[in-house]
Image (cartoon, rainbow, N blue to C red):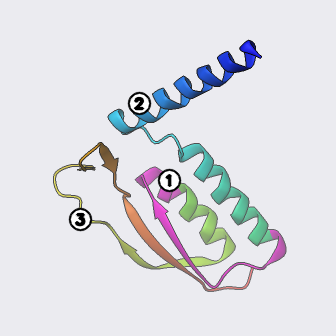
Amino acid sequence: MPDLVWVVLLLLVFFGLWQFIGRATGADLGSPFREQWFAFQARRWRAKSNAPSVLKRTYWTAAEFKRDHARLVSVGYKVVDQTSPERGPQEFVLSSRYRRRLPAFYVTYQLTVAA
């Protein structure tokens, strides 16, 4: 039982530091997970030909947009709307407790060709 308590305590400290470092530095810790999810969706839509007709995506970096855009074009999507949030001089929004990162792009895709 004491070993389990130490493991739980260690995990809590690890995730607490992870949140603190991500918020303080603006590091995007979810990027690898989003990248894998977007790639999985594109493969599934290409294989089953059941892609949604309209797709809205939020991208946090230009590189993330570029990689996903190439995948979606191969499925048959085209960009119909692309906006950026009002960012001002900083990439972060200061709230009362911590800095929060803003997305770089909001993109709406439309399926043009049945894959």
Residue at numbered disc 1: 64
The image shows residue 68 at horizontal and vertical percentages of 57, 60
Separation of marks 3 and 1 at Cα, in angstroms:
19 Å
Element on which disc 3 rests? loop
Magenta-tinted stretch: 47-66
In this view, 109 is above or below 38: below
In this view, 47 is above or below 94: below
Separation of marks 2 and 1 at Cα, in angstroms:
21 Å
The furthest residue to the front: 1
The image shows residue 48 at horizontal and vertical percentages of 83, 74
Element on which disc 2 rests? helix
The furthest residue to the right: 48
In this view, 92 is above or below 27: below
Which labelled disc corresponds to residue 53? none
Say which amino acid is labelled 2. Answer: Ile
Task: Judge left or right: residue 64 versus residue 101.
Answer: right
Going from the N terminus, do you reach mark 2 or mark 1 first?
2
Please name whichever residue, 3 or 78, is drawn nearer the observer in this view of the structure: 3
Q: Quadrant of residue 104?
A: bottom left
Which labelled disc corresponds to residue 86? 3
Q: Residue at x 23, y 65 (%)?
A: 86
Task: Judge left or right: residue 98 versus residue 18.
Answer: left
Element on which disc 1 rests? helix
Task: Judge left or right: residue 105 versus residue 5.
Answer: left
Say which amino acid is labelled 1. Answer: Glu
3 vs 1, front mark: 3
The image shows residue 49 at horizontal and vertical percentages of 79, 78
Residue at numbered disc 2: 21
The furthest residue to the top: 2
Q: Quadrant of residue 23?
A: top left
Q: Residue at x 66, y 50 (%)?
A: 36
